[in-house]
Image (cartoon, coloured by chain):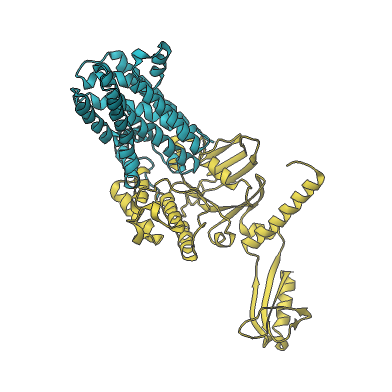
Chain colours: A cyan, B yellow
């Protein structure tokens, strides 16, 4: 029995790691794909029924906020619980002793969990167009925005899962952050106090909201939002890498 | 390098200490040097620090004090070069529950650098060796406990590395599965490889190990080859007989062994070898020979050696407790 070559090239490693994550859909496609869509879509419908006469800007915010909420449910709530289980059960050791790149492993994981929510995101766009008559564009810019927002939120989700002392606490913290994304996305900031708009900037969905609003309406987003979201995603990824590699 | 290509200091551990949050001391100044090309059994009672030692060696746990060198390089937890050098079989469940058995093993081989064709061949080879070929398309999540354990073992050994740390490989396995696992571990031997084996199944591990480390309370209690440990414990041997007829033989009374309604008795002596040979000669005297069913003159097994160390450990603990001293 001879020794194996010790390291796979990144181009080989990335699809293999993606395959590991996508395999999760075999047993858990309902929570990953449906649950992440149902709650945001339900909220959009409820708001349409209870407040049919809100302004156009607020209608856009509700729909865009619900799209990001779908991603938040997958990347924050579900990923934090899955990561906490992996950590608490020591099943994560399997990955930790393999010669794979930790940033690549986490990035691939975040992207997969983001994409799991995209059927829901598409449904909410259509729902927004039907209920509010919004001219929502399926622009190519939406892809990098949703991916960057997914990586930023995935970083938060993984951080919660990796640092929580118990799986149940990870679920609690994940839901609290998801609630923040919900409020920031669906409550018009014009009606909120100044501190609330600053608090929204602390959430991974802050810059994503602004960018997505512009993208879906076909407008140009300010570069500061792009920079903000990219920096947020990079910092969240770096923090998650640190938490993953932190030895006992 | 030794003539066989093995490094004499494949693994060096010096003053290794691990204190967990809350003050629990898992390892306490463990020191040993191990050459490559051998399989080393790490034995000890529950809580002796065996698994923590393995986790520190493979870089999953950071030592509180002391250091580890693998093939001349200082071990830093989670270092990339270290992960290329070590494979680890944990006691815990496998992360790859959503994959099929083949995918779990094949993917692990590929992530360890095997080209797809080679990874596939290695995966099939290991699955065959462990009797998992028929289960190759089943989801890992749907397997029984023993089958799941076999897949974890397959994933750990599919791409052998210079250091292989196997924690309780035969846990949860039936006798046939255990036999396959020990055969697979035997096949991992290589002059440039060191296999560390934590096992409570000392009797089965005996055939696989070249050297033994016995841990107690986070320290090395005894170390050496099974032969050296036997010599250290004295030159005694076991003389065991089964015989029929009355319970009296050579002035001793045998314990009834009861088989097929026969009046079968068993006697067992722990004796210095010359005395055992003298008594054996007496037993083979014509007067007794017709009554003998079995005669067994043997050295103590590794398990018996280990149990004799356990007695010593318990005595040391009792003395420490009586003295009111801490560790």
Residue A20 vs residue B305: left or right? left
Work out whether residue B277 or residue A23 is closer to the camera in this orientation and state it: A23
Direction right: furthest residue: B323
Q: Is residue A147 visible?
A: no
Residue A208 versus residue B153: which sits nearer the camera?
Answer: A208
Residue B195: x %, y % from top left:
51, 51
Location of the C terminus of chain B by quadrant is top right
- Out of B122 and B323, give the one closest to the viewer: B323
Horizontally, residue A201 falls left or right of residue A33, namely: right
Q: Position of residue A5 (x, y in %)?
A: 37, 44
Give the residue displayed 39% in from the left and 18% down from the top.
A200
Report how many numbered discs are placed on residues in the image. 0
Rendered view: B172 above or below B91: below
Residue located at (41% from left, 54% from top): B151
Task: Give residue B279's position: percent from left, percent from top.
Answer: 73, 77
Residue located at (71% from left, 59% from top): B233
Q: Is residue B60 left or right of residue B266?
A: left
Vertical placement of residue B13 versus A59, above or below: below
User: Is residue A156 at all visible to an observer of this figure?
Assistant: yes
Residue B72 spot, x, y in % from top left:
52, 38
Q: Which quadrant holds residue A199?
A: top left
């Amino acid at each position: 029995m001879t020794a194996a070559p010790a390291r796979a090239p990144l181009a080989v490693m990335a699809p293999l790691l993606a395959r590991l994550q996508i395999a999760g859909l075999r047993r858990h496609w309902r929570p990953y794909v449906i649950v992440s869509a149902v709650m945001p879509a339900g909220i959009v419908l409820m708001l349409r029924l209870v407040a049919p006469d809100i302004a156009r800007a607020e209608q856009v915010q509700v729909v865009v906020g619900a799209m990001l909420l779908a991603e938040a449910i997958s990347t924050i709530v579900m990923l934090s619980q899955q990561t906490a289980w992996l950590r608490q059960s020591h099943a994560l050791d399997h990955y930790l002793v393999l010669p794979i790149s930790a940033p690549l492993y986490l990035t691939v994981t975040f992207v997969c969990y983001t994409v799991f929510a995209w059927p829901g995101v598409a449904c909410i766009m259509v729902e927004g167009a039907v209920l509010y008559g919004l001219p929502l564009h399926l622009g190519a810019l939406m892809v990098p925005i949703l991916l960057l927002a997914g990586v930023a939120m995935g970083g938060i989700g993984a951080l919660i899962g990796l640092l929580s002392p118990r799986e149940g606490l990870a679920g609690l913290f994940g839901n609290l952050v998801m609630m923040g994304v919900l409020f920031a996305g669906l409550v018009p900031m014009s009606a909120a106090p100044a501190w609330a708009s600053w608090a929204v900037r602390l959430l991974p969905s802050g810059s994503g909201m602004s960018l997505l609003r512009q993208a879906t309406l076909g407008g140009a987003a300010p570069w500061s939002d792009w920079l903000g979201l990219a920096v947020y995603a990079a910092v969240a990824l770096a923090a998650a890498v640190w938490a993953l590699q932190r030895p006992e | 390098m030794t003539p066989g290509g093995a490094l004499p200091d494949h693994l060096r551990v010096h003053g290794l200490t691990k204190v967990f949050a809350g003050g629990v001391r898992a390892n306490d100044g463990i020191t040993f040097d191990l050459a490559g090309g051998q399989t080393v059994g790490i034995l000890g009672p529950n809580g002796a620090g065996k698994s923590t030692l393995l986790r520190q060696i493979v870089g999953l746990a950071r030592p509180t004090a002391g250091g580890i060198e693998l093939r001349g390089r200082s071990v830093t937890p989670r270092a990339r070069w270290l992960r290329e050098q070590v494979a680890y079989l944990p006691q815990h469940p496998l992360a790859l529950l959503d994959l099929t058995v083949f995918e779990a093993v094949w993917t692990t081989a590929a992530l360890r650098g095997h080209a797809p064709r080679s990874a596939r061949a290695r995966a099939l080879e290991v699955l065959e060796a462990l009797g998992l070929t028929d289960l190759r398309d089943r989801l890992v999540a749907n397997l029984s406990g023993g089958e799941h354990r076999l897949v974890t073992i397959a994933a750990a050994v599919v791409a052998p590395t210079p250091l292989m740390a196997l924690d309780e490989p035969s846990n949860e396995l039936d006798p046939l599965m255990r036999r396959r696992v020990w055969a697979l571990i035997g096949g991992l031997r290589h002059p440039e490889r060191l296999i560390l084996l934590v096992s409570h199944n000392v009797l089965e591990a005996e055939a696989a190990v070249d050297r033994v480390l016995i841990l107690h309370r986070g320290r090395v209690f005894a170390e050496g080859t099974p032969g050296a440990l036997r010599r250290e414990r004295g030159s005694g041997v076991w003389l065991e007989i089964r015989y029929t007829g009355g319970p009296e033989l050579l002035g001793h009374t045998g314990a009834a062994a009861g088989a097929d309604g026969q009046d079968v008795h068993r006697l067992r002596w722990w004796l210095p070898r010359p005395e055992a040979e003298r008594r054996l000669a007496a037993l083979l005297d014509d007067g007794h020979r017709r009554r003998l069913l079995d005669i067994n003159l043997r050295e103590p097994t590794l398990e018996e050696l280990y149990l004799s160390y356990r007695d010593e450990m318990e005595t040391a603990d009792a003395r420490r407790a009586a003295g009111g001293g801490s560790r």
